[in-house]
Image (cartoon, rainbow, N blue to C red):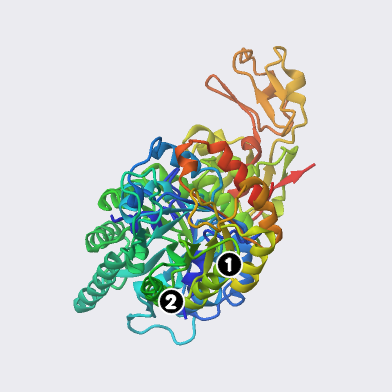
Amino acid sequence: MGTGKDVRLSKVFDPSDGRAVVVAADHGLMLGPIQGVLELEKTLQKVVEGKPDAILLSPGQAEKLSNLFKGRMAPSLLVRVDWTNTFRDRTYTLPVRETFFGTVSSPRHALKLGARAVVTYLFLGYEDEEMEARHLSLVSKYASECAKVELPLIVEPIPLGPRVTKANNAELVAMAARVAVEAGADALKVPYTGDPESFSNVVRAAAGVPILVLGGYRALSRRDLLEVIVETMEVGGSGVVFGRNVVQAQDPKKVLEDLRAIVHEKKSVREVLAGGEAPKKIKLGAQPERCSGCLLCTAICSFSHEGDHNLSAGRLKVEGRWPGPFKLAVCTQCGRCVEACPKKALSVNPAFGFIFWNEERCDLCGRCVEACPFGVIKLQGSKIKVCDLCGGTPECVDWCPRGALRVITS
Amino acid sequence: MGTGRELRKSEFIDQVDKRSVILQASHGLMLGPSEGEDIEVLRTIAKTGIDGIIVTRGFANRYSSIFRGRNSPAMLLSLDWTNAFRGRDHPLPMARLEHMFLSSVEEALSLGASGVTAYFFIGHEDDEHEASNMEALSTACRDCDSLEMPILVQVIPIGERVTAENYVDSLALASRMAVEAGADILAVPYAGKDGHSRIVAAAKVPVLLLDLEMKMSKGQPEFNIELDTPDAIRAGGSGLLLGRRYIERKNTPYVERLVKLVHGG
């Protein structure tokens, strides 16, 4: 890599950790004035406050909104040089019938706009193989012009079309990534492949070229959204590109602060979700009328504490049969177990209010289990299992699909 | 029209106070190595909050790591060469002024530079030199227009024809000529508080103070960087362009003080 590319890319990927948090806000070019990009300037003013490393825009918006990129510490401007109709699915006006792509800018033009890198798609999986050849040839053309003007090229390799299946998707992402690297990509933004193992294959395929994971993956909760990023970084990913998850968020600044905490400050998901604020005393609240009896809460409780899905190991209880009604029992921190313990092995955590079990003091007499009016403290093996509120961010609340569990702040 | 020029300029002119402190580290091309010169010193100076560092292309390629990351100073590429700064103590002291352009704006862009810089001398013994300086500067400025690259012009009155009486007038003349040719930012020697405010008023672009290490003409006023800089800023000046003595003296805290002097805090 030449000096120019190296210097420019270092303003996107922080040299201190080699990672980046990028916001994509180029949707208007392909999808029209969707929510969040309709008032793009207002949205991006909030985005900039969250200090992303870079923002991806269409060439037209890059020129209009250049003020947002002024100053050495401002985010880097990335410009999209291509266009496609392929993301206009059935929920949009004039849905796509056949995938096409085209050029809307060039590396030279982007450089004049002050861009620090350009971004292009590379689709693999076309029914008509000539289209794949043409797409690769367009990406190669961008790559050679980028090499001439020393502007980094970020390629977005995406498997797409009827030949892509659930079974071959991860393999195709890895393949498309490698094709992009061989064609001259200096960085990649790739869709999540669903699990760390297949993502590590993509990282290996990229042969050292930094990889950002796209934020468009299916996430069941805020925790899930962030945990995917941690997973990708653990296998060599270099950060994220978030689009709608940021520009359509109520509070884009907060979302970006969470992302920065995960990507750059190496905070755990748990720490980020706890908000970094002074801990507050919390309780679990149950609304049994909402419960569908799916037992996801007990499964995730056992999974997050013991690593398996033992429904009887949960620190909360769901009773009843479909279609209900169901009875939900959660620890209320009433403290009877603490009082009942002759060895003072149980105590109330002063910060969050959860019950803390001191393994060394405990002689497993079981009086606490007897004392619990709800039956949610258990003696299994040589362990007392009592609700620890997951350190302040209860997983059962995150995972309940019906909102039957919630956190009550006192 | 592109927006690159404004964005690149914003990398070395602070967006809040519109001021700047730039360090010139390109003297090696004109003067050879200097005593005490040390890349590690430059690395520490780069962390003082200085806005930009002027380098040559050879330097840019070898020490680009100084410019990596958004919290590093901006890279400015020096386009030209001159023997004007070879004083009597130099092994090859200047006998006749020579000045030429060596690097292109295109090259600066491909190195990832945020700006370019060139000299504009006034007071030449040979009038043709003034003409060729103007022509070369204009060519660079045209390239800057088409490639969206900001250009900082260092305006220096030089030679026997410049006296104490005509110093401010000469500097005002040359400054305005450089701006009309296309300069985005000027760096000029201090011409006293009133003189400096005249230059600023005529320039209409940000004007930095040039900390010249030698007397380039008989008329050049004395300059006390700590006393005169605040005066120059009050007169509308936009900051400082520091020479190589700051690298030679390895005095990073002093540079830090000057950065504070300009930007406050």
Which labelled disc corresponds to residue B101?
Answer: none
Looking at the picture, which amino acid does disc 2 mark? Asp
Q: Is residue A301 left or right of residue B76?
A: right
Q: Residue at x 35, y 48 (%)?
A: B31
* Left or right: A407 as drawn, with respect to A92: right
Give the chain letter at badge 2.
B
Secondary element under disc 1, as helix, strand or loop, is loop
Q: Could you say where residue B76 lies in the image, as x and y percent from the top left? A: 43, 58
Which numbered marker is on residue B145? 2
Judge whether A360 appears above or below A109 on screen: above
Residue B36, position as x, y percentages in the image: 40, 35
- Residue lying furthest bottom in this view? A94
Task: Choose the circle earlier in sequence order: 1 or 2.
Answer: 2
**Res. A250 visible in picture:** no
Q: Is the residue under label 2 in contact with that under label 1 (CB below 8 Å)?
A: no
| Mark 1 burial class by Cα count in 10 Å: few <14, some 14-19, many 20+ | few
The correct choice, above or below, for B19 with respect to B6 in the image is above
Q: Is residue A314 visible?
A: yes
Both marks 1 and 2 on one chain? yes
Q: Work out how far the residue at label 1 is from the one at label 2, CA to CA, in angstroms.
A: 33 Å
Name the disc covering residue B166, or none: 1
